[in-house]
Amino acid sequence: MSRTLPDLLKMEPLDGTNFKRWSQKLFNYFEQLEVDYGLFTDPPKITPQTTEASTAIVTTSQTVTDSSRREDEFKVKYERDNKKVRGHLLNHMTNTLFNLFVNHKSARTIWNTLESRYGGDDAGRKKYVGKWLQFQIVDGKSIMDQVHEYEKTTTFLVKT
């Protein structure tokens, strides 16, 4: 079964103003690779390894061993997929954003931070632009005073 994957080489890097489109394209790509769970799933907890002596005491040692093996396989898969998703996230950012996130080891942390930072910006930006288009200079008042007054009334609309 062959998959048609989007061409990410043509994708513009995240610069903070294009998060919605950028995130949808990357999420679609991650879904097709079946690694999107890494954006929403906590990393598996590392449990101490059981020794052969302790598993021999348990009467269902084969069940314990199988369960332990499945956990280990999931940890390895999660680490591999996290590395893949993290790499794509970082490679599709501007250098400024890359420098901010390069030290984050979890793709989920990067995704959640970006979503909280830029996810709601579109609505705020539209309100800000709408207010700007309605802004008019009034005679008899300093231009700078009017601009400062405008900025005070609109700063709550745009996240910093």
Image (cartoon, rainbow, N blue to C red):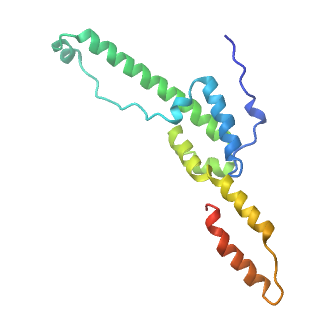
74 left or right of 33 in image: left
Query: Height in image: 139 above or below 153?
Result: below
23 left or right of 62 in image: right
User: Which residue is drawn at the image coordinates 63% and 34% (left, top)?
Assistant: 27
Q: Residue furthest left?
A: 57
Q: Tell me which corner region of the image, top left, top right, bottom left or bottom right, holds residue 73.
A: top left
Q: Position of residue 30 (x, y in %)?
A: 61, 29
Query: Height in image: 147 above or below 119?
Result: below
User: Which residue is drawn at the image coordinates 69% and 35% (left, top)?
Assistant: 25
83 left or right of 94 in image: left
Q: Position of residue 129 (x, y in %)?
A: 75, 62
Image quadrant holding the N terminus, namely top right
User: Which residue is drawn at the image coordinates 15% and 14% (left, top)?
Assistant: 57
95 left or right of 141 in image: left
Image quadrant holding the C terminus, namely bottom right
Q: Position of residue 109 (x, y in %)?
A: 51, 43
Q: Residue furthest bottom?
A: 140
Q: Tell me which corner region of the image, top left, top right, bottom left or bottom right, holds residue 69.
A: top left
